[in-house]
Image (spheres, rainbow, N blue to C red):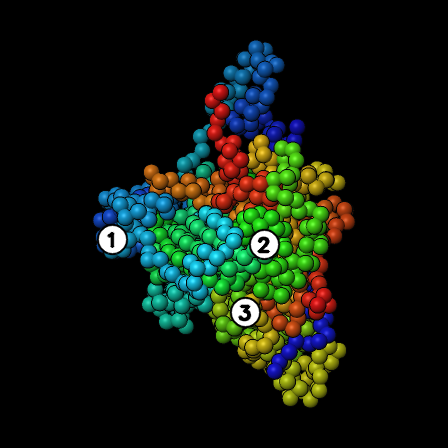
């Protein structure tokens, strides 16, 4: 179980708790009835936050970030507008395009669809965190080399999705790249080169099929 | 007469996009990223009625809501709103949430009026009128050539078809919007725009501020595709909010707004009749077309383009033709230019009927094109493309592919005007340390303008791209036009050429170095002393061109049980003059093809006729192509350096949908006459759309 799915018990949220319950209910339902009741009571006893701004601490790119935000502020807004991390973009605000993708404990998530207060206690990585010393990461570099971007607005999201894939699976197939990028949209149409960049970052040699043919030579 | 160097080092090289490192690092600041000190959020309240008389807008409660610094009505007094999503009022506040809360407190008194959103209903006289003083269906414009009726009566082969294309949405990834600061010193707008000078002039006019006090900046922008060529209503609203709140206001539209109020590609409903002689030579054409640009065209709304007419008979020559076209108004947001306006639908109609003719003549559709296409360039491209694609081996009689999953092939050709000019001027500054700054008030939509300017300057000065710094996207730089019509590269390249030529001349005059290029550069610049050299170049004719031809071939797989279409391969041969930046040129071509796949198979704005709302205003319902939908793309850039620099952003998207539609028809043996070719439409064409009751 990844860290994202197993928060420490002291800060268990209702969502994580219920998610865990759902997965194990069939097997141990009766034995755990009492434990369930206790956990629910604990969840209900969590301090009700808001609606006014509350202090939160996020771990962004390895640094603690203290903010004062309303509980209804999303992680994306907190990053972009309360902390100046504008690498993650807002394009749909609806978990439909992936331009806001960041890593939460290494797992790609839509920052537009997670509340900032819920992201506390997790390691958040934004595209700015991939090149902390100014030297581009392998994935960023292959995106540059293969021209896997045009307007560039969706690019940070794709880079985060590909980065997460390669961290988990250093030698993916083309189908695995497609799957990893299934939640990201690009309107300029850079997909073929995103595929090339992802494979190249994984050490696969890629070649473009493009050719320049002189009309004069042909005529 | 100026001319490009015969031997080129930088021009045509596979140089990397110069702003790619900033974009991949998240360091590139888009207009939506800019955050001037003490900035506020701006948000717009839109009409929830497709048509209504609005009598009163009460902002009292909203303006007193927590965190709200300004609230305004978009227009004073009574007004009629004509589509769901029209701008009514706006607020600026300290947080997104404060603005969301405040919008709910705005009271709008309105009387809903009858409306119509479907083209076929709107054209009936009995339908509610979008505009009181004019019928929805405009007068048909008729263009007639030769003796059409006589020609048809003499044609041994005549085919007829009815082809429809949808209203499509631009949906650039960065939504429309601006961050605007209006102070006593003037207006500064960080705008997501394809035309910084256009926005400057529109803001100056609307706000009654002298043009020299309006500055528009767009360093990076997240796509436009034609929908960001004008300052939309949201620009002026943001400025007014800024003035009222005495603070900068960031007003970026939501994805939902993008489906309602910032443009679209008009629909077309094309009834076409085509007649040919026995040998397949086109003799007669009749085309009647109508479509909707939304509530209207021209100056009716800010940013509308309006014309729904398609060029006919498109790339072909037909001696006798009658073309009748009209727009029909509906209660929906206005159209705007969309990547190669009117050309993809023209291509779909003409190339479809041409394949119908080929079927009737029992002729190979490629052969029919070679016989009728007047362009020598395109005929060569067809021959080259056919060879690479394997047309001879892959073309089978329509519907002859065996099994439930059928394959088919199709092809289509295109043209686009393009060309350069637009009064473009470029400033080149050569510093004593040898570094060069090139400044131009153009903008880079993601097309690669920065890279093109860098490579041209490096070529002309005999330098490496790293020695050139290009600054664009600011109205304080010398002017250039809006980036539309594939005109940017052909406009800026000759002006950069001129500026660099003048810089070399001036450098020689001031330093005595005969040829300062290459290895002499550093020494010559040193001799400049303290002051840098600054020269201005102008657009020069003869260095760029337009009027390109291109062809595409498509191979598809169609599942006759599910109706699902998969594009397997696209072969594209695109005439593109002198290629300046090879890498970004290829990316543009890929992008045009992929947008064409969306137009062919997925994209359509759907309106609800009972409520008048857009039913698919976000990406989970308005479908775009994804990485998983990518076919193999075989791309040939057909280079003709003697024609100079040509923009190819638009031509490459024109024939894709038509080639795919022809391939689907070839696979099935029946034609899907409407875009997008959805599974439901495929099944309907196969007669499989009715549930069996036995």
Along the polypeptide, which appears first: circle 2 or circle 3? 2
Q: Nearer the viewer, mark 2 or mark 1?
A: 2
Task: Give residue B12's quadrant in the image.
Answer: bottom right
Towards the viewer: A62 or A172: A172
- At mark 1, the secondary structure is loop
Task: Give the labeled residue for mark 3.
Answer: B419
Q: Quadrant of residue B189?
A: bottom left
Name the front one of labels 2 and 3. 2
Q: Give me the chain letter of mark 2.
A: B
* C-alpha span from label 2 to label 1: 42 Å
**Mark 2 = which residue?**
B412
Chain hosting mark 3: B
Depth check, front residue: A71 or B476: B476
Residue count near mark 1 (Cα–Cα under 10 Å), binned few <14, some 14–19, many ≥20: few
> Which x, y percent locates residue B408?
63, 43
Q: Which residue is drawn at the image coordinates 53% and 61% (left, top)? A: B316
Residue B445 vs B559, above or below: the answer is below
Q: Which residue: 51% across, 26% down?
A: A14
Placement of B75 over or under B515, stated as above or below: above
User: In the image, residue B325 lies at what x, y percent?
Assistant: 39, 57
The vertical placement of B79 against B316, above or below, is above
State yes or no: discs 1 and 3 in contact (Cβ < 8 Å): no
| In the image, farthest residue toward the top | A30
């Amino acid at each position: 179980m990844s860290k994202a799915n197993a928060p420490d018990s002291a800060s268990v949220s209702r969502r994580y708790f219920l998610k865990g319950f759902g997965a194990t209910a069939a097997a141990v339902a009766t034995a755990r009835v009492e434990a369930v009741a206790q956990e629910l009571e604990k969840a209900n006893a969590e301090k009700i936050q808001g609606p006014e701004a509350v202090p939160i601490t996020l771990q962004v790119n390895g640094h603690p970030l203290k903010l004062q935000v309303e509980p209804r502020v999303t992680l994306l807004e907190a990053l972009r507008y309360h902390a100046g991390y504008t690498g993650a973009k807002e394009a749909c605000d609806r978990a439909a395009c992936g331009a806001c993708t960041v890593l939460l404990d290494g797992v790609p998530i839509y920052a537009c669809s997670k509340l900032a207060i819920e992201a506390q206690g997790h390691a958040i990585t934004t595209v700015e965190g991939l090149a902390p010393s100014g030297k581009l990461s392998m994935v960023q570099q292959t995106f540059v080399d293969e021209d896997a971007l045009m307007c560039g607005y969706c690019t940070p999201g794709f880079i985060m999705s590909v980065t997460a894939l390669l961290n988990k699976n250093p030698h993916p197939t083309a189908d695995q790249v497609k799957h990893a990028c299934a939640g990201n949209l690009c309107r300029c149409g850079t997909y073929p080169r995103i595929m090339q960049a992802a494979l190249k970052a994984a050490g696969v040699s890629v070649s473009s099929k493009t050719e320049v043919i002189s009309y004069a030579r042909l005529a | 007469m100026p001319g490009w160097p015969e031997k080129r080092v930088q021009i045509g090289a596979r140089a990397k996009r110069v702003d790619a490192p900033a974009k991949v690092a998240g360091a590139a600041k888009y207009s939506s990223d800019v955050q001037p000190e003490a900035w506020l959020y701006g948000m717009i309240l839109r009409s929830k009625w497709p048509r209504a008389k609005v009598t009163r807008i009460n902002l009292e409660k909203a303006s007193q809501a927590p965190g709200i610094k300004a609230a305004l009505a978009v227009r004073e007094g009574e007004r009629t709103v004509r589509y769901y999503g029209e701008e009514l009022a706006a607020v600026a506040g300290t947080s997104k949430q404060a603005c969301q809360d405040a919008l709910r407190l705005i009271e709008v008194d309105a009387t809903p009026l009858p409306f119509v959103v479907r083209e076929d209903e709107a054209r009936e006289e009995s339908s509610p009128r979008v505009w009181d003083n004019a019928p929805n269906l405009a007068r048909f414009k008729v263009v007639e050539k030769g003796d059409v009726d006589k020609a048809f009566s003499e044609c041994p082969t005549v085919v007829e078809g009815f082809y429809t294309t949808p209203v499509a949405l631009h949906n650039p990834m960065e939504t429309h919007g601006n961050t605007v600061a209006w102070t006593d010193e003037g207006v500064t707008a960080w705008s997501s725009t394809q035309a910084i000078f256009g926005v400057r002039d529109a803001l100056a006019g609307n706000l009654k501020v002298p043009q020299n006090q309006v500055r528009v900046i767009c360093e990076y922008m997240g796509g436009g595709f034609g929908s960001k060529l004008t300052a939309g209503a949201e620009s002026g609203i943001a400025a007014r909010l800024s003035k009222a709140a005495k603070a900068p206001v960031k007003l970026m539209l939501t994805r939902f707004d993008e489906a309602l109020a910032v443009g679209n590609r008009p629909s077309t409903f094309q009834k076409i009749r085509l007649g040919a002689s026995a040998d397949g030579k086109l003799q007669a054409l009749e085309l009647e077309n109508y479509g909707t640009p939304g509530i209207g065209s021209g100056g009716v709304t800010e940013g509308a383009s309006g014309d729904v007419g398609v060029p006919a008979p498109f790339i072909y020559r037909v001696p006798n033709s009658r073309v009748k076209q009209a727009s029909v108004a509906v209660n929906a947001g206005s159209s705007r230019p969309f990547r190669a306006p009117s050309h993809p639908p023209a291509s779909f109609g003409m190339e479809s009927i041409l394949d119908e003719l080929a079927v009737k003549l029992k002729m190979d559709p490629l052969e029919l094109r070679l016989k009728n296409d007047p362009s020598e360039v395109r005929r060569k491209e067809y021959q080259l493309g056919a060879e690479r694609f394997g047309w001879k081996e892959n073309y089978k009689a329509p519907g002859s592919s065996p099994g439930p999953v059928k394959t088919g092939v199709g092809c289509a050709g295109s043209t686009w005007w393009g060309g350069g000019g637009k009064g473009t001027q470029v400033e080149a500054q050569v510093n004593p340390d040898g570094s060069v700054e090139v400044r131009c008030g153009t903008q880079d939509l993601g097309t690669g303008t920065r890279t093109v300017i860098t490579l041209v300057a490096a070529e002309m000065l005999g330098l490496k791209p790293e020695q050139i710094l290009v600054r664009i996207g600011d109205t304080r730089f010398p002017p250039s036009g809006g980036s539309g019509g594939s005109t940017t590269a052909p406009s800026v390249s000759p002006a950069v050429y001129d500026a660099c030529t003048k810089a070399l001349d001036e450098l020689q005059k001031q330093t005595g170095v005969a040829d300062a290029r290459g290895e002499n550069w550093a020494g010559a610049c040193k001799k400049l002393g303290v002051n840098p050299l600054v020269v201005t170049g102008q657009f020069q004719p003869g260095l760029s061109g337009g009027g390109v031809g291109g062809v595409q071939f498509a191979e598809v797989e169609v599942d006759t049980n599910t109706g699902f279409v998969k594009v397997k391969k696209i072969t594209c041969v695109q005439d593109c003059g002198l290629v300046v930046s090879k890498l970004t040129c290829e990316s543009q071509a890929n992008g045009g093809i992929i947008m064409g796949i969306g137009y062919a198979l997925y994209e359509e704005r759907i309106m609800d006729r009972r409520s008048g709302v857009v039913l698919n205003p976000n990406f989970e319902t308005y479908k775009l192509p994804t990485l998983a939908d990518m076919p193999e793309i075989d791309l040939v850039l057909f280079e003709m350096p003697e024609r100079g620099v040509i923009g190819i952003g638009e031509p490459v998207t024109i024939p894709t949908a038509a080639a795919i539609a022809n391939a689907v028809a070839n696979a099935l043996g029946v034609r899907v006459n409407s875009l997008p070719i959805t599974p439901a439409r495929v099944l309907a064409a196969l007669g499989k759309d009715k549930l069996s009751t036995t």
